[in-house]
Image: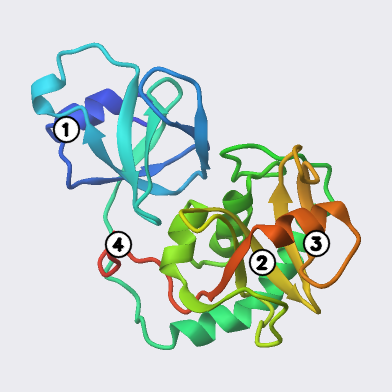
Amino acid sequence: MENYKDPISLFKQTNFSKTIWWRLKVNISGYQNETENKLVTEIFKNRIFKLIYPNIQQQSQNFSRILVQLYEDGYVCWINLDGLMIEKCELRKSDNINHEYSFIKQKVPLILKWIQDQSKLTNEYLWGGTLGPNFDCSGLIQTAFLTHHIHIPRDSYQIKNFCKHLFYFKEFNRKLQPGDLLFFGTKEKCDHVGIYKGDGLYYHSSGKEFGRNGIGLDTIKETNDPISLHYKSKLISAGRLVRRYRWDRTIR
């Protein structure tokens, strides 16, 4: 069995290869850069990554973080070496990609039920949160799908670009189906995402300012609720997940 407690020795054995994949044996945090503690994502045990930095020419330098790219969504972030436990991972051939939309569609009720259950737990908004009970907006959506074996991108604008576009919003649209994703922000960039429940209602994790500081249920129908009104004013478009992110076939 490989030594989980000494990742550097494992990287050295493979000459800091950029093509070998590693499986995490613990939950870890992902950071924005090499030095600051700005959380951008939390990473589940058993997720898979490959090394980006350092490389073989830099292995003699002292460093406490490494730059990695995650397999399931292509996300790039820095992780700490301290406490890191890994094992080498041999990727299997991709599963059959046919009928993916049917697979996703049948999981939607379970995904919505999972989010409903999470909303009942004591939680608050956490920038970068994916492990729960505290989530950011896209972390909630990504983890809801990941829990049901559907890989999607990490950030809201990435999810928007990955989805099948349905329409831009002018008013409530009855073509929406449970499980469709709602995107919020400006014409320049999407910065928030929620998931449609039905009857004009959607789940999302919103922050303290203008939001509910955690997972809540809001509406895109006519309402006097100030929080729903705020997000309705930021509503851009709707999209539908019809495929899973796959490293070997998805444009990154």
Quarter containing the N terminus: top left
The label nearer to you, 1 versus 4, is 4
231 relative to 17 in the view: left or right: right
Q: Which residue is mark 3?
A: 218
**What's the CA distance linking mark 4 and mark 2?**
24 Å
Label 4 residue SS? loop
**What's the CA distance linking mark 2 and mark 3?**
10 Å
Residue 245: percent from left, percent from top: 39, 66
Quarter containing the C terminus: bottom left
Q: Is residue 2 visible?
A: no
The label nearer to you, 2 versus 1, is 2
Residue 234: percent from left, percent from top: 65, 57
Q: Which residue is mark 2?
A: 195
Q: Residue at x 16, y 32 (%)?
A: 16
Q: Amino acid at mark 1?
A: Phe
Q: Residue furthest top?
A: 62
Picture disc at residue 247 = 4
**Mark before the other along the chain sequence, 4 or 2:** 2
**Mark before the other along the chain sequence, 2 or 1:** 1
